[in-house]
Image: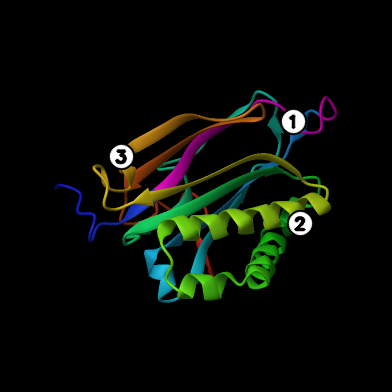
Amino acid sequence: MAFNPSTDKIAITITEFTLKKSADGIFGKYNEPYIVSLAIDEHGSNNPKIDFNIMPFPKVAVGGKVKMLGDGHLLYGPKNPGQFVALSVLIMESDSDMQELGGRIAEIVDSKAVELGVGAIVSANPGSAAILGILKELTQLVAGELKQNKDDELYRIEGTFLRDHQVPYHVNRAYTGLGNDYIDLTMQIIPLEHPNGEGPVTKVVAL
């Protein structure tokens, strides 16, 4: 069946990444990178919320490639975004206790969203460009807070996927070769009704 952008669900996932270089230089054999993703779609203007996910990867050696099972690590979805979904992805290197990571970052995202007034901005129903702008600003604040906790920023990327495009949401497209001196990653947008249960599902941070 043909993809119906008005009703069908999508997922945005990372299928693999390579740690090309450590922010800690030559010290230590293994590193502990983690992925933080923040997304806001059109439906968030009616009920302001952020789709949030975090995934730690302990014991990754420099040059090591991490491949995800199934459809990959979920950054957004599966859901129908409406007219757009704005996405921001942050990859950090942990210098702290990985067991406490999820709760700590969720608290940081919540507090920085309140500090920025993201809920009020999203409720005003701005367009996709404005939503992406506030999401980028929120990601910068989150990264700054994590750096104060001695974690290092490795890579950051943002973008918007639009429904009313020649290829809606760029569905069935894979972005390869994304990255910088530290990270190389592959991201994809796929039609997906249900997560495969091979990794953490996205959580909702109410605004």
Q: Secondary structure at mark 2?
A: helix
Out of 29 and 123, give the one closest to the viewer: 123
Disc on the earlier residue, 1 or 2? 1
Residue in the image at 45% along x and 29% along y: 176
Q: Secondary structure at mark 1?
A: loop
Residue 80 painted magenta: no
Q: Mark 3: few, some, or many residues within 10 Å (few <14, many ≥20)?
A: some
Residue flagged by tag 1: what amino acid is it?
Answer: Ser
In this rendering, position of residue 79 left or right of residue 186: left
In this rendering, position of residue 166 left or right of residue 22: left
Residue in the image at 63% along x and 26% along y: 64
In terms of image quadrants, where is residue 23?
top right
Disc on the earlier residue, 2 or 3? 2
In this rendering, position of residue 155 left or right of residue 75: right
Q: Disc 2 and disc 3: Cα gap in Å?
A: 35 Å
Disc on the earlier residue, 3 or 1? 1
Residue flagged by tag 2: what amino acid is it?
Answer: Glu
Q: Position of residue 164 (x, y in %)?
A: 26, 52
Residue flagged by tag 3: what amino acid is it?
Answer: Asn
Residue in the image at 48% along x and 59% along y: 130
Report the span colored magenta. Answer: 12-28
Which residue is denoted by mark 2 in the rendering? 145
Residue in the image at 32% along x and 51% along y: 192
Q: Is residue 131 above or below residue 183?
A: below
In terms of image quadrants, where is residue 133?
bottom right
Q: Mark 1: few, some, or many residues within 10 Å (few <14, many ≥20)?
A: many
Which residue is denoted by mark 1 in the rendering? 22
Q: Position of residue 189 (x, y in %)?
A: 37, 44
Q: Which mark is residue 172?
A: 3
Out of 33 and 91, give the one closest to the viewer: 91
Pair 2/3: label in front? 2
Q: Are marks 3 and 1 in contact (CB under 8 Å)?
A: no
